[in-house]
Image: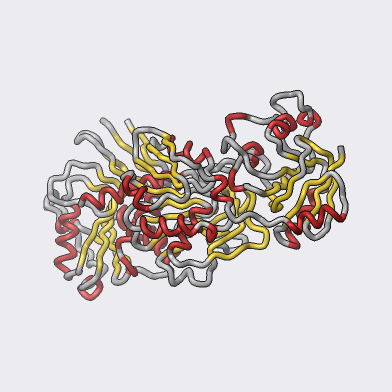
Amino acid sequence: MKRYLILEDGTVFCGDSVGSTTISTGELVVTNNIGGLEQTITDQTYNDQIIVFVSPLISTIGMNRDDYESIALSCKGVIFNSIPINQMDESNPKSLAHFLKKRRLPGITNVNIQRLAAHVKKHGAMKASIMDADDEHAIDQIRALVIPHDRVKTVSTKQPYPNPNVGFKIAVIDLGLKFSILRQLSIRKCDSIILPYNISAEDILELDPDAVLFTSGPGDPREIPETIATCQQLEGKLPIFGIGLGHLVVALANGAEIEQMSYGHHGSNIPTLEIATENIEFSNHNHNYTVAHTNVAQINFFITYRCVEDNTIEGLRHRSDPTMTVQFQPEAAPGTHDTLYIFDEFIEMINSFKQGNQL
Amino acid sequence: MNKEIVDDKTMKRTLTRITYEIIEKNKGNQNLVLIGIKTRGAYLAKRIKSRLYQLEDIEVPQYDLDVTNFRDDHPEMTNNEQPQFTSEDVNGKNVVLIDDVLYTGRTIRAALDAIMSIGRPSKISLAVLVDRGHRELPIRADYVGKNIPTSHKELIKVSMAEIDDEDKIEIITN
């Protein structure tokens, strides 16, 4: 069955249907992740987005249940260059087609990905729609679509829940949590409790945690002023670690400015420089917004990581409070394990904060 | 028996963290002076200095210090080398003393005497790569890389790429 990917500006790409045959509309993002297909599709940061995989061939071995990053996935569609013929078989319970069908996720394969990726890179991020027919009506529909402004509210947990262990008590503020963050905390024996995005600072302090972690998540951080206010009230009282959207929340809470990138960083081949040691590391990036260079000198932070390619700020650290943030995803799912040590640094930061309190 | 407990990657990480903490606790990095106790402490101080330069674009003064003349455990050893810094270099400054292993605290006591015999800093803090316990003097470190509990019979050996060809920390049991 032929299906069409129709872009906001009228460009049409044709391909074969895989998975569900529903119609869906969302923002287009291009990622170059080769491994970790399951992890990418189930990542809540891709909420309301259509994911384009530029890899020539993907999903040769099918879906692995161990690698899911959330229970309910919330992306709007997947576009492939090509997938193996056995993965198109919906009757095979481990195939990609079966997974997409069960999760009611539409996909298109055999799309001219090089042209699509080049188009997005040239014209910037845009809305797109997966449709059965290519007609005028489709473009009107896309233009009428308003990108939602409550993505974090959609993906954040409604009720707090614990992830018990025996170590430090971490209050994890769920802005679109990836399970790998909890896995990394569990490896370090953290007794975490996962809280909704709009929890107040008093409620967090009432739980008496050892540290607070703001997770990665979808959308624009300016849409969640309640989380920014919470962060402002907690700063200095507890060690704070921000990942992805959490990094932007912490930066906004301290008066930094945020700017939108033209097509963002999506993928695992973006080199970041750790400024202190001049080490180059690779990690999974997934962000459309970045901290602007304009007033970063005035805020009370210093830059710990920056992207080598376009000089964007990828990590910050507070000059006097125990607050550290990274824009990329150190939990590495998908991606290389270069930056897992950042979780160890977080634990060490909690340790030295506690020792400092005792002295 | 030698057992490697810290590899080169972790050692670099630890030094980076100590640098972050030095920035955190010294707002503005004003009047900061790094003094490394010879021999490995001096190399650690050089590395912290280069990290501070990368991060904050500031050239922090860094000196080496030989404490042989001030030791109380080896009075027969002497050293005629002139100290690298004068009283102007440390008077009123915020000195961070850097050493590799903190054990009895006697080396640090000697270093404090050595600095005080030259000048009067406004504050001296201590950064060590390893704190192995068994203090014999009331001394503690402000920045600790790793706390490694040991027994008296064991020995902690810090190797640094500058003189030992590689970065590692070993624990040696006889």
Give the color scheme: rainbow, by chain, secondary structure or one colour.
Answer: secondary structure
- A54 relative position to A43: left or right: right
Q: Residue at point 72% right, 47% down?
A: A52
x%, y% of residue B136? Answer: 13, 45
Q: Residue at point 80% right, 40% down?
A: A109
x%, y% of residue B165? Answer: 42, 47
- B95 relative position to B58: left or right: left
Q: Residue at point 31% right, 58% down?
A: B42
Q: Residue at point 47% right, 49% down?
A: A197
Closer to the camera in the image, B91 or B170: B91
Which quadrant: the C terminus of chain B? Answer: top left
Closer to the camera in the image, B30 or A105: A105
User: How many numbered marks, from 0 up?
Assistant: 0
Which quadrant: the N terminus of chain B? Answer: top left
Closer to the camera in the image, A240 or A58: A240
Q: Is residue B19 shown to the viewer in this render? A: no
Q: Is residue A77 shown to the viewer in this render? A: yes
Answer above or below: position of A319 versus A217: below
x%, y% of residue B92? Answer: 21, 73
Closer to the camera in the image, A13 or A116: A13
x%, y% of residue A31? Answer: 68, 49
- A69 relative position to A18: left or right: left
> Most extreme residue toward the bottom, as rendered?
B88
